[in-house]
């Protein structure tokens, strides 16, 4: 049972890790508190699920989910940079409108995908034929590892391009990067698009992995993402982009594991999860300060 | 080459805090000028630079660079031909990025929205050459984060970033004002050397009268949003602090008062 719980937590941690990477882009790279997340995550699930049940290929459906997420990020970005609405409110506005939009897309609050083809259909057959003798219970784990690893690597490489550097400078010192000829409105919007595209992709994969899309599945996503980013930060620090993105994924896995631990001990029921998550985030946020106090340090942490 | 024509600017217009900074200010900067700007607090020195850089929009008047009207060009577009160094060493660099990453952003100035690699072996070589020129040992610290540098090192780095891709005009806003005297001398020397070697048209705001007189070929004194003295050439070369203060009294009919101004 333990082994199974561990396996499931790692699998979930990896899939939700894609979402956490999206949160990392806005929160850590752009220094933009984006709340679109709670809407763009179920948006990905909604788009993918409705396209799949209407007969489209699950791969097309997943690609469409990525585009939809980018569009959600674009809208938040335009609200903030164009209409000059504050970061928080821009995200909240998009998130709230997405609740209605997601219901429109799905046509009902819940779409089961149990008997539908997904991106994982045929995976078992494929592995059985190509890699005979491979332990089938680890199929998802290995697939997710490869997939999330690829996404992380692409993100790291992107952040090393000239555009990636500009994005990082936008979050770090917007005045400086403007004086180097970069329109920070554009970099903000690009960052928001990439972030929400990843979050939406995560939603699309989660829906296919758990076998349904639900209009309420986005509630608290931002907090889970936040928890992953913060746990990762506490574990690996901010030495480089590679280590901090690895930290985010590791944080996501650890977060899922602690949640299932709490549930398996019957310390709480599933409906208590959001509260538990919030408590985890509060603890993770206060530990660094607590550590400083213990060390007798009077130096305050760098960012607020 | 740079012409400011009849510039007017009022902050907080129509409120009790209304502050009319410029009313019909005009200035012509010639190719190769190295202008030092002095003046009391609130004279409009920083506002002047911010208006040229496009950080602050003007209420009236026009700005021309090389004959082209740039009055409505946004800041990030003007950055293609304007280099800037600020007073606060924190403002000119990105603290949590490395020295070489910062340089890379300056090296690709105005071409930063691209998917080319930010850092290559070739670029690192170029950056090393630039940094070894200033003998602050920064060439050995390319992959360190900028926040680990001292204020003087950051200003030197910002100066290199502002001039690496030769700007049409360099704007220095009291860029040694926050440094200790020794470091200020190093950064000032570096400034003079770069401006001379690259023949960059420069406007430098300073609170140090001695620097203002010693450096550059032209000196502007501002007072209440007006350019009250414009001293050039031989007259500038023969200028002393006493003569300058006397001249100010002659023009303004009042003593030059400035608590922050350093007379020596």
Image (cartoon, rainbow, N blue to C red):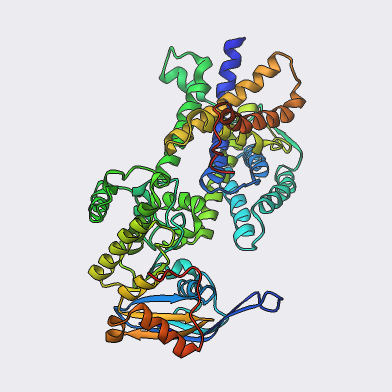
Quarter of the rendering containing residue A222: top right
In the rendered structure, the answer to whether residue B34 lies left or right of residue A147 reads left
Q: Where is residue A92 in the image (x, y as percent from the top left)?
A: 70, 49
In the rendered structure, the answer to whether residue B224 lies left or right of residue B155 reads right
In the rendered structure, the answer to whether residue B238 lies left or right of residue A212 reads left
Q: How many discs appear?
A: 0
Query: In the rendered image, is residue B229 in sight?
Result: no
| Residue nearest the viewer, comparing B69 with B128 | B128
* Vertical comparison of B123 with A157: above or below: below
Quarter of the rendering containing residue B241: bottom left
Name the quarter where the N terminus of chain A is drawn: top right
Measuring 55% from the left and 41% from the top, which residue is drawn there? Answer: A22
Name the quarter where the C terminus of chain A is drawn: top right
Measuring 41% from the left and 61% from the top, which residue is drawn there? Answer: A180
| Residue nearest the viewer, comparing B189 with A291 | B189
| Residue nearest the viewer, comparing B238 with B87 | B238
Measuring 52% from the left and 25% from the top, which residue is drawn there? Answer: A122
């Amino acid at each position: 049972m333990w082994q199974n719980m561990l396996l499931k937590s790692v699998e979930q941690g990896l899939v939700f890790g894609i979402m956490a990477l999206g949160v990392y882009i806005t929160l850590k790279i752009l220094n933009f508190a984006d709340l679109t997340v709670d809407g763009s995550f179920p948006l990905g699930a909604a788009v993918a699920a409705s396209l799949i049940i209407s007969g489209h290929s699950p791969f097309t459906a997943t690609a469409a989910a990525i585009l939809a997420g980018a569009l959600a990020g674009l809208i938040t970005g335009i609200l903030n940079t164009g209409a000059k609405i504050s970061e928080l409110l821009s995200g909240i506005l998009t998130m709230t409108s997405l609740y209605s939009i997601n219901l429109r897309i799905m046509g009902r609050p819940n779409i089961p995908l149990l008997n539908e083809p997904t991106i994982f259909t045929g995976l078992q057959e494929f592995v059985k034929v190509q890699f005979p003798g491979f332990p089938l219970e680890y199929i998802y784990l290995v697939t997710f590892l490869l997939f999330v690893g690829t996404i992380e690597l692409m993100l790291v490489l992107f952040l090393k391009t000239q555009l990636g550097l500009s994005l990082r400078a936008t979050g770090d010192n917007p005045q400086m990067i403007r004086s180097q000829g970069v329109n920070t409105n554009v970099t903000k919007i690009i960052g928001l698009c990439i972030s929400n595209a990843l979050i939406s992709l995560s939603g699309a994969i989660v829906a296919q992995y758990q076998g349904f899309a639900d209009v309420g599945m986005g509630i608290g996503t931002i907090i889970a993402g936040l928890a992953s980013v913060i746990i990762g930060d506490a574990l690996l620090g901010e030495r480089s982009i590679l280590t901090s993105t690895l930290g985010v994924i590791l944080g996501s896995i650890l977060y899922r594991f602690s949640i299932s631990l709490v549930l398996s001990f019957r310390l709480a029921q599933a409906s208590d999860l959001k509260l538990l998550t919030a408590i985890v985030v509060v603890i993770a946020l206060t530990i660094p300060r607590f550590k400083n106090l213990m060390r007798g340090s009077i130096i305050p942490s760098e960012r607020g | 080459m740079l012409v400011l024509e009849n510039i007017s600017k009022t902050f907080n217009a129509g409120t009790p805090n209304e502050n009319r900074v410029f009313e019909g200010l005009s200035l012509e900067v010639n190719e190769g000028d190295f202008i030092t700007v002095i003046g009391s607090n609130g004279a409009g020195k920083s506002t002047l630079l911010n208006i040229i850089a496009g950080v602050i929009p003007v209420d009236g008047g026009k700005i021309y660079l090389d004959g082209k009207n740039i009055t409505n060009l946004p800041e990030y577009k003007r950055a293609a031909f304007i280099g800037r160094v600020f007073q606060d060493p924190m403002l000119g660099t990105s603290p949590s990025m490395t020295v070489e990453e910062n340089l890379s952003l300056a090296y690709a100035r105005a071409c930063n929205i691209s998917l080319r690699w930010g850092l290559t072996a070739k670029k690192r070589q170029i950056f090393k050459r630039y940094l070894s020129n200033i003998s602050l040992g920064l060439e050995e610290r390319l992959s360190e984060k900028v926040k680990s540098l001292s204020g003087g090192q950051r200003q030197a780095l910002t100066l290199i970033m502002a001039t690496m891709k030769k700007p049409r005009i360099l704007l220095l806003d009291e860029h040694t004002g926050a440094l200790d005297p020794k470091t200020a001398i190093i950064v000032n020397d570096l400034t003079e050397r770069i401006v001379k070697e690259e023949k960059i048209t420069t406007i430098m705001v300073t609170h140090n009268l001695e620097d203002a007189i010693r450096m550059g070929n032209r000196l502007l004194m501002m007072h209440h949003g007006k350019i009250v003295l414009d001293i050039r050439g031989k007259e500038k070369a023969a200028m002393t602090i006493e003569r300058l203060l006397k001249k100010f009294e002659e023009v303004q009919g009042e003593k030059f008062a400035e608590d922050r101004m350093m007379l020596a």
